[in-house]
């Protein structure tokens, strides 16, 4: 069986994509409670803090894809995945899920989850 491709973008008579329809559809998803849920500020503040050099972290941050360097501030999620502090805090303000394994921190008050 061949896969079915569905296009979610409408087109006007000239063949140009209708950006307004895309914006309406995208905004509608968030209006109905779909989308990312930020992590609780308290949960974020409780993430253990280390620095490169004292931590066993080697390699790169999965959020920014930059190599860890000596002295970089890191935060470790409860799932044991570590990230640059600035990167994971930025991520968690948008989504409470670990970027690697989808471990869920408690949601920010008023966002459910």
Image (tube, rainbow, N blue to C red):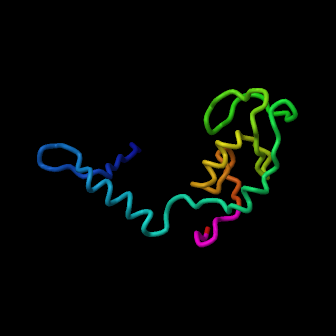
The picture places residue 26, in percent across and down from the top left corner, at 38, 57
Query: Horizontally, is 35 left or right of 89 in the view?
Result: left
Q: Looking at the image, which residue is at 75% across and 56% down?
A: 45
Q: Farthest residue to the right: give it.
A: 54
Q: Looking at the image, which residue is at 12% across and 48% down?
A: 13
Residue 73 position by quadrant = top right
Q: Is residue 2 above or below residue 69?
A: below
Image quarter of the N terminus = top left
Query: Horizontally, is 78 left or right of 16 in the view?
Result: right
Residue 100 position by quadrant = top right
The picture places residue 89, in percent across and down from the top left corner, at 66, 49
The picture places residue 86, in percent across and down from the top left corner, at 66, 43
User: Which region is colored magenta?
Assistant: 106-112
Q: Farthest residue to the front: give it.
A: 71
Image quarter of the C terminus = bottom right
Magenta residue check for 107? yes
């Amino acid at each position: 069986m061949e896969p079915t491709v569905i296009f979610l973008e409408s087109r006007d008579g000239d063949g140009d994509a209708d950006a307004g329809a895309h914006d309406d559809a995208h905004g509608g998803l968030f209006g109905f409670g779909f989308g990312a849920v930020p992590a609780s500020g308290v949960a974020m503040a409780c993430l253990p803090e280390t620095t490169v050099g004292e931590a066993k972290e080697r390699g790169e941050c999965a959020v920014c894809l930059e190599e860890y360097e000596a002295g970089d501030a890191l935060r470790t999620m409860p799932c044991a995945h570590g990230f640059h502090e600035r990167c994971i805090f930025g991520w968690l303000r948008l989504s409470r899920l670990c970027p690697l394994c989808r471990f869920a921190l408690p949601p920010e008050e008023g966002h459910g989850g």
